[in-house]
Amino acid sequence: MAQNDYQDFISKIKRKTGIDLSLYKEAQMKRRLTSLYEKKGFASFEVFYEALSKEHQLLDEFLDRMTINVSEFYRNSKRWEVLEQKILPKILAENKRPKIWSAACSTGEEPYTIAMVMSKFMPLSELQIQATDLDTNVINRAKAGVYPERSLNEVPAEIRKKYFTQEGSFYKVDDKIKKTIVYKQHNLLAEPFGGPYDLIVCRNVLIYFTEEAKDELYKKFSAALRPGGIFFVGSTEQIFNPAAYGFDTEDTFFYRKQ
């Protein structure tokens, strides 16, 4: 019964929101959503869905829980050093104004980090980065650009001084950085990708998908890059057969389209 309850829930959610939960690893997603509905006092997925249909706020909260928003600036800072010292100089040698996409950008730390790194190479007025996420709530938080101190743990001191202002116990991102990002809602699994991009950054998201969904996404990311373009993934997301998607390994967690 419980299994069917979840399967019914999945198909109703897909019809209602266009989001296909079956593409996420089932055990993780089911556990996360069960704890949410139990916390709210519901007894089953069926009752939970009825409530979601009626209460907009509950639906928002459900979407928030579904999209995994754990982010910070310069996350795994050594990788950002590789981007700055090794990857970007090559990209910029081929295109002075590269086309960059931060996919599944969550609350904005990642696209803002890209902009801060890029600011060492070009005037911010010439920079535009596309950033997308499934969840409009997190996009709104990203646009606000206000973060708790723990999000800044790995930010280099000179960058912190230059691009953040402290307001009480929070830190606000400089408007010059904020203006470089264009935010848009986008469903990676269901909607087409634009392109061709010079750099696509999609980190710490793919681990939540099934192998089939991941396979599909790697193909889409590859198709969205120009030849020689770079795909930058998270530090638990190594692609073990990059050639299958038309990639060569450029560095750990960086893949170059052949």
Image: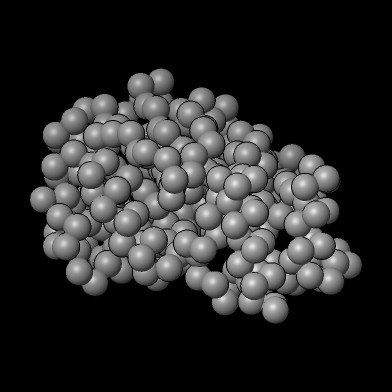
Q: In this view, does 74 lie above or below 134?
A: below
Q: Which of 211 and 179 is in front in this view?
A: 211
**Residue sitting farthest toward the left:** 258
Could you say which is closer to the camera, residue 138 or residue 167? Answer: 138
For the question of whether residue 169 can be seen, the reply is no
Say which residue appears at 79% left-offset and 42% top-offset: 56
Q: Where is residue 108 in the image (x, y as percent from the top left)?
A: 55, 43
> Where 215 sits versus 1, above or below?
above
Residue at 31%, 29% in the rendered image? 122
Pick out the residue farthest to the top.
125
Could you tell whether 93 is left or right of 34 in the image? left
Residue that lies at the very extreme toward the right in this rendered image: 41
In the image: residue 56, left or right of residue 7: right
How are the colours assigned in the image? one colour
Residue 258 seen: yes
Q: Residue at the spot x=50%, y=70% of the render?
A: 25
Q: In which quarter of the image is the N terminus?
A: bottom right
Instruction: Answer with left or right where residue 12 lies relative to residue 116.
Output: right
Give residue 32's quadrant in the image.
Answer: bottom right
Q: Where is residue 15 in the image (x, y as percent from the top left)?
A: 60, 47
- Residue at 66%, 61% (x, y): give it: 9
Q: Position of residue 94 (x, y in %)?
A: 14, 34
Whether residue 9 is situated above or below residue 13 in the rendered picture = below
The percent position of residue 11, horizontal first and vertical second, equals 59, 57
Judging depth in this view, the residue of 120 and 215 nearest the camera is: 215
Q: 180 or 187: nearer the eye? A: 187
In which image quadrant can residue 78 be found?
A: bottom left
Q: Is residue 104 above or below residue 154?
A: above
Residue 138 lies left or right of residue 237; in this view the side is right
The quarter of the displayed image where residue 80 is located: bottom left
